[in-house]
């Protein structure tokens, strides 16, 4: 009966949201009326892209974003609001093709490995240029690797380029050859090497040498000074309003007819306050697609496809994951009143948070089934890992999990001598401190705010008080990466590309930047984290897939036994996309519909306005 009520509620909401749809000319209208006249000769060795359709130049694709970018520096960005944009602006040695789910050539036209299984040679294509026309050579590749491997900067990609404490060696015997030597055999060299995005040495080396690289290509940098290596360049940025990307006129990609890509004149990211506003923008015809629509709107999309000239693509369970966790971070630099090694949070709360029994009890208090039926309108699945049911290769259904069991949660808390000592309905620890904590999440994501409210109500039933603190996304990222000013946080992890655990070393290794519960440890601070570090070495180095899968299985079990991450449901992804564009190939791997943006085009059937 509950499921039927949820379905009827969704239908009612869909009708309430029914508003006039735009005509077929819509958001994808052409931004130019004349055919594209390529001003530059094609490169000597172009990247020929085989797309389903040969398109034509012109038009813009508009997408909503609930947060603007924190930076245009691809290497230093580590959040979706930045990555979704900068991934279109910068490229690596290879790329991941979402359609075939394999690495394909990009700046490197080919690669090979020596008999020692340690030495990899990448052959760069000749004639590649940055968006200012400056040649891209091995010097730029070496520079970009040097930046990523810099200990002071420690970008997220660095964790994948270190094996047993030793950094990869990167050299260049000539302008178009790059040689990478790993300390030990590595099963993921191409993917990890390609996570180093190519930045222009001729413009950024001075900032790097001066210790100012982290602030280079900031959001205040004039658009014409942000020089890119990918198919798009920055045209304009208006804070809290929009980001406009335009064609890189020197991009080395071409279609089957030797027409230079990309086809689109512009991709526009328009900032909206939340996912509800994103839906209204799509329903009004002001944007062309939604990557993260709310499940409560799925029924409306299903019912209005023909009328709105769009298609709703059902991609199955997301590869993205949602979770919350407690702040176990330690002070790394001495501050007023804090010594190195002290917990960042209040010492009393740290004692609670640092106890696995407490974390397990919290996990067992969360009614995920009710959350799925209510918040997700049934369009979600339970999930216990970053490798979700949407990942056919790495998903493990039989790992350790602490699902809803409020009686066991109460028993665990009682074993810690947490009980209501004053009759106010809130448990107290043996010293009389009320068991209470603040939970932060990003305010622009109503689904996460909804889950946080659910968690608050569920934990209240077992005597734990939760105070919700929604903040804007970029503030939350600062709290997680820089100042650690939070007690518990609820956020998500977007799947790595390619979607396999070896790409998540910045999450799983104890030294990792995104090892959220206790980031950037100088050395593993628990035996369990030391073991995970060892297992990640197996995942990275062993060429035998069953051995890698077994190691990943153990990593998941350790994380879940410790309940460092308290997992929440994963949404079923259904994407509404305008029919006005050709070569759209929506994928469960992000970016779900802009992953092949260089070949998307406005079709003749779209009309002009």
Image (cartoon, rainbow, N blue to C red):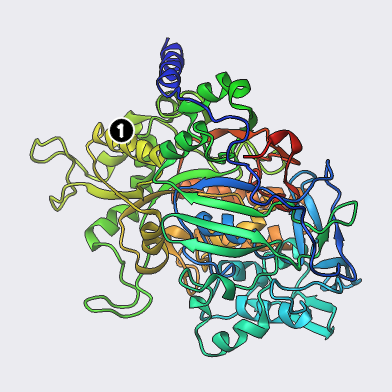
- Residue 315 occupies quadrant: top right
Quarter of the image with the N terminus is top left
Could you tell me which secondary element the residue under label 1 belongs to? helix
- Residue 46 occupies quadrant: bottom right
Q: Residue at x 17, y 50 (%)?
A: 430
Horizontal side, residue 521 vs residue 191: left or right = left
- Please identify the residue farthest to the top as the structure is shown: 1
- Residue 445 occupies quadrant: top left
Q: Is residue 597 above or below residue 463?
A: below
Q: Which residue matches tag 1?
A: 458
Place of residue 110 in the rendered image (x, y in percent of width and height, measured from the top left): 88, 66
Please tell me how crowded label 1 is: few (under 14), some (14-19), or many (20+) other residues with Cα within 10 Å. Answer: many
Instruction: Mark yes or no: residue 535 visible.
Output: no
Q: Residue at x 39, y 42 (%)?
A: 360
Q: Residue at x 78, y 80 (%)?
A: 138
Which of the pair 76/70 is nearer the observer?
A: 70
Q: Is residue 434 above or below residue 40?
A: above
Q: Is residue 111 above or below residue 95?
A: below
Place of residue 489 in the rendered image (x, y in percent of width and height, measured from the top left): 37, 51
Instruction: Mark yes or no: residue 575 visible.
Output: yes
Which of the pair 269/3 is nearer the observer?
A: 269
Q: Residue at x 23, y 79 (%)?
A: 336
């Amino acid at each position: 009966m509950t499921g039927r009520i949820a379905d009827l509620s969704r239908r009612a909401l869909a009708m309430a949201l029914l508003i006039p749809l735009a005509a077929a000319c819509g958001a994808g209208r052409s931004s130019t009326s004349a055919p594209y006249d390529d001003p530059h000769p094609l490169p000597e060795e172009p990247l020929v892209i085989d797309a389903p359709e040969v398109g034509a130049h012109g038009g813009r694709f508009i997408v909503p974003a609930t947060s603007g970018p924190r930076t245009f520096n691809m290497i230093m960005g580590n959040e979706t609001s930045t990555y979704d944009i900068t991934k279109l602006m910068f490229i690596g040695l290879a790329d991941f093709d979402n359609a075939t789910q394999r690495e394909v050539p990009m700046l490197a036209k080919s690669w090979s490995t020596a008999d020692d299984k340690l030495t990899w040679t990448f052959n760069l294509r000749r004639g590649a240029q940055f968006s200012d026309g400056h040649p891209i050579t091995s010097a730029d590749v070496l520079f970009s690797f040097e930046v990523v491997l810099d200990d002071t900067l420690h970008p997220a990609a660095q964790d994948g380029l270190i094996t047993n404490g030793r950094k990869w060696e990167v050299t260049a015997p000539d302008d178009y050859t790059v040689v990478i030597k790993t300390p030990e055999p590595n099963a993921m060299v191409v993917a990890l090497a390609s996570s180093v995005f190519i930045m222009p040495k001729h413009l950024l080396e001075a900032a790097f040498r001066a210790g100012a690289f982290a602030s280079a290509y900031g959001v205040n940098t004039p658009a014409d000074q942000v020089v890119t290596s990918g198919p798009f360049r920055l045209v304009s940025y208006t804070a809290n309003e929009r980001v406009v990307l335009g064609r890189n006129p020197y991009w080395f990609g071409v279609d089957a007819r030797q027409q230079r890509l990309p086809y689109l004149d512009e991709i526009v990211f328009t900032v909206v306050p939340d996912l509800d506003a994103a839906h209204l923008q799509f329903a009004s015809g002001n944007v062309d697609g939604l990557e993260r629509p709310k499940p409560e709107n799925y029924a409306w999309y299903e019912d209005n496809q023909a009328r709105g000239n769009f298609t709703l693509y059902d991609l199955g369970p997301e590869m993205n994951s949602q979770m919350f966790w407690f702040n176990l971070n330690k002070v790394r630099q001495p501050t007023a009143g804090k010594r190195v090694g002290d917990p960042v949070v209040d010492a009393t709360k740290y004692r609670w948070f640092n106890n696995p029994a407490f974390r397990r009890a919290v996990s067992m208090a969360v009614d995920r089934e009710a959350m799925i039926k209510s918040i997700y309108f049934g369009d979600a699945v339970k999930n216990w890992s970053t490798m979700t049911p949407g990942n056919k290769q790495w998903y493990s259904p039989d790992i350790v999990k602490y699902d809803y069991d409020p009686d066991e949660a109460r028993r665990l808390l009682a074993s810690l001598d947490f009980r209501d000592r004053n009759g106010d309905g809130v448990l107290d620890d043996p010293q009389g401190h009320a068991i209470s904590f603040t939970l932060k999440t990003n305010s622009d994501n109503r689904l996460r705010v909804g889950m946080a409210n659910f968690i608050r109500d569920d934990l209240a039933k077992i005597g734990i008080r939760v105070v919700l603190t929604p903040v804007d996304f970029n503030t939350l990222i600062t709290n997680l990466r820089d100042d650690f000013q939070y007690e518990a946080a609820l956020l998500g992890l977007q799947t790595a590309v390619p979607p396999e655990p070896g790409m998540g070393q910045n999450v799983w290794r104890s030294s990792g930047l995104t090892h959220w519960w206790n980031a950037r440890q100088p050395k593993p601070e628990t035996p369990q984290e030391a073991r995970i570090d060892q297992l990640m070495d197996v995942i990275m180095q062993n060429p035998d897939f069953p051995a890698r899968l077994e190691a990943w299985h153990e990593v998941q079990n350790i994380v879940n036994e410790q309940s460092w991450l308290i997992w929440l449901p994963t949404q079923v992804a259904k994407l509404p996309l305008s029919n006005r564009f050709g070569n759209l190939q929506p994928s469960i791997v992000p970016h779900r519909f802009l992953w092949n943006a260089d070949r998307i085009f406005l079709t003749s059937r779209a009309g002009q306005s």
